[in-house]
Amino acid sequence: MDVKVIHNDTARRFESLVDGHLSVAEYQLSDGVMHMTHTLVPSALRGRGVAAHLVQAALDHAKEQGLKVNPLCSYVALYMERHPETQRLRAP
């Protein structure tokens, strides 16, 4: 599935609109750390990889900006655990 993810800097979230449904991965920034607080994908889209696209976009952004990531959201924590290459982004 081709999922387009947009970074909404003002709202501090990554967004994707698929089949008329908005999915988001929200974060807060402080002291060079992106605190990933919440990921929401409507039930109509679950199981289609939308959350993974949102999280990967957020992690790519963190890497590009030189940020560390604190995965407060359980989905983000699980995603990072399943993708060892993302561990270097994890905040201490």
Image (spheres, rainbow, N blue to C red):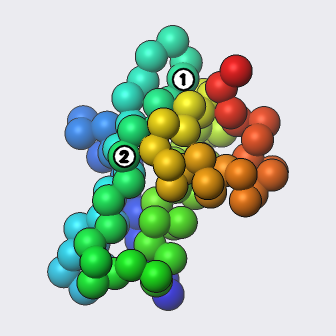
CA–CA distance in space, label 1 to label 2: 15 Å
Choose top left, top right, bottom left or bottom right for residue 88.
top right
Identify which residue is drawn at 60% across, 28% down: 67
Q: Residue furthest left?
A: 20
Q: Secondary structure at mark 2?
A: strand
Q: Residue at x 27, y 84 (%)?
A: 44
Residue at the spot 56% in from the left edge and 31% down from the top edge: 70
Instruction: Specify whether residue 65 is in view.
Output: no
**Mark 1 crowd level (few <14, some 14–19, many ≥20, 10 Å Cα):** some
For badge 1, the amino acid type reads Val
The answer, for residue 49, to whether it is visible in the render is yes
Q: Quadrant of the C terminus?
A: top right
Structural crowding at the residue carrying mark 2, measured as other residues with C-alpha within 10 Å and reported as few (<14), some (14–19) or many (≥20)? some
What residue did someone put label 1 on?
33
Q: Which mark is residue 38?
A: 2
Residue 42 image offset from top left, x and y in percent? 26, 72
- Compared with 22, 81 (above or below) is above
Task: Classify 74 as above or below 15.
Answer: above
Q: Is residue 72 left or right of residue 59?
A: left
Quadrant of the image occupied by residue 30: top left
Ranked by sequence position, the earlier of labels 1 and 2 is 1
Residue 58, x across and y down, in percent: 51, 48
Residue shown at 71% from the left, 51% from the top? 81
Please give the count of numbered marks on the rendered protein: 2
Kind of residue sitting beneath label 2: His
How far across and how far down the image is residue 85, in percent?
A: 81, 51
